[in-house]
Amino acid sequence: MLNENIKALRKTKGLTQDELAIRLNVVRQTISKWEKGLSVPDAEMLQKIAEVFEVNVSQLLGSPINQNENVDIIAEQLSRINEQLVVKNNRSRKIWKTIGIILAIIIVGQLLLVALGFTAYKSYEVNTDTYEEYVEEFVDD
């Protein structure tokens, strides 16, 4: 029962035997022996294990821990995270769409300014030609 609980809690927390061993300052083989029921931790170590798994020692020694309950909790948390990601992605898409529209407006505006500038320049060229002809006629008289 203890061996099953240690294994179930370790997996629930997403820890490997190596990671648990590091947290408890023991070697991985010790964790393996506990999980196989070949040895049991002493009282001090039981307290450390309970602290790592955030449970009471009595729960650690008690009836087998049902992993399905934890799976439901994890599924609910993943569902919430997924919903938050959808909202974030939608927000991000709106921002990029807005930025694209603003850039398009700026580019079109710049093109219009260039076209108007070119038209004004051509108009100025025509006016200066006319002015030069006017001046030549005036000087000739």
Image (tube, helix red, strand yellow):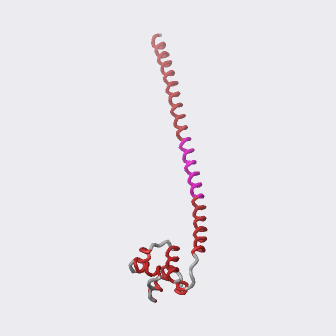
- Of 32 and 61, the residue lying toward us: 32
Question: Magenta region: which residues?
Answer: 86-105
- Of 121 and 39, the residue lying toward us: 39
- Residue furthest to the bottom: 43
Residue 57 drawn above or below residue 72: below
Q: How many marks?
A: 0
Which residue is drawn at the image coordinates 53% and 43% (left, top)?
A: 103
Which residue is drawn at the image coordinates 61% and 70% (left, top)?
A: 72
Which residue is drawn at the image coordinates 50% and 18% (left, top)?
A: 130
Which residue is drawn at the image coordinates 57% and 74% (left, top)?
A: 67
- Residue furthest to the top: 141
Residue 95: x and y in percent read 56, 51
Residue 27: x and y in percent read 38, 78
Magenta region includes residue 55: no
Left or right of residue 68: residue 140:
left
Residue 39: x and y in percent read 44, 85
Residue 129 drawn above or below residue 107: above
Query: What type of secondary structure mainly makes up the magenta span?
Result: helix
